[in-house]
Image (cartoon, helix red, strand yellow):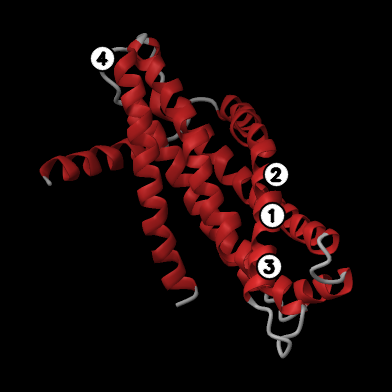
Amino acid sequence: MMRLFQNLGRYLIFIRRVFSRPEKHSLYFRQVFREIDKLGVSSLGIVAIISFFIGMVVIIHMTTSISNPLIPAYYNSFTTRDVLVLEFSSSVLCLILAGKVGSNISSEIGTMRITEQIDALETMGINSASYLVQPKIIGMMLIIPVLVIISIFIGLLGGWFIAVVGNMMTSADYLQGIRFDFHPYKVFYTLIKSVVFAFIITSVSAYHGYYTQGGALEVGRSSTLAVVWSMILILISNYLVTQIMIG
């Protein structure tokens, strides 16, 4: 328990250092766009593939589970839309990205630590925590909501494809279900969640990498801890945000 509080205190101090005033704003500005490309845009492929197939799977489950003739056909796509918007394209997708992006961030910064590159930055009077981590956090908080919107769209496209090709429902019924009882607040809610998750993934992964000690074996251990703790905190924050905004 004491170790947990010790790590919590060190994490908060680390976040304070990360968001201290940067030495040169223009340099950080350019670095943010590099991180958006490296961490976010590079994840677009896996986001598209997973979302497309999840959309197909969800509509298949909805069609086979809700086969009552008294229930309108468009109800299947309506439910699929809400599943994608409310949970999959934010929560589940960010859990997946915690493994891909989180391990990348932790191993990158951990390698810099054990090869003394971070020490060299500190020797030159640069706030290494801010220089290395702040652009990553800002970049991820900007790009993750975009990936979530893309995920929703591709997931719905995958559902439409299998519903029409598999003769489960007509294209008109599917589109009617997507439009039925739509509340923009649901999209706002899922975007807020994605921003919170992006902060957690980036900051927790960077924290574990930044305080890596030892050699290559410890870098791997830090990456594992980063992914595990990111996923745990995503699940906890998912409940808290949902309780505040929906409950």
Side (left or right) of 236 relative to 198: left
Is residue 36 or residue 16 the one in the foreground? 36
Looking at the picture, which amino acid does disc 2 mark? Answer: Ala
**Which element is circle 3 on?**
helix
* Earlier-in-chain disc, 4 versus 3: 3
Check disc 3 and report the residue beneath it: 81
The image shows residue 18, relative to residue 230, as above or below, that is: above
Looking at the picture, which amino acid does disc 3 mark? Answer: Arg
* Earlier-in-chain disc, 3 versus 1: 3
Q: Quadrant of residue 107?
A: top left
- Residue at the image point whose x is 52% and y is 43% from the top: 96
Check disc 4 and report the residue beneath it: 214
Looking at the picture, which amino acid does disc 1 mark? Answer: Ile
Q: Counting other residues with Cα less than 10 Å from the Cα at mark 3, is it few (<14), some (14-19), or many (20 or more)? A: many
| Residue 39 in view (yes/no) | yes
Disc on res. 149: 1
Give the label, 2 or 4, closer to the camera.
Answer: 2
Give the label, 3 or 1, closer to the camera.
Answer: 3
- Residue at the image point whose x is 34% and y is 13% from the top: 216
Marks 4 & 3, CB-CB < 8 Å contact: no
Looking at the picture, which amino acid does disc 4 mark? Answer: Gly
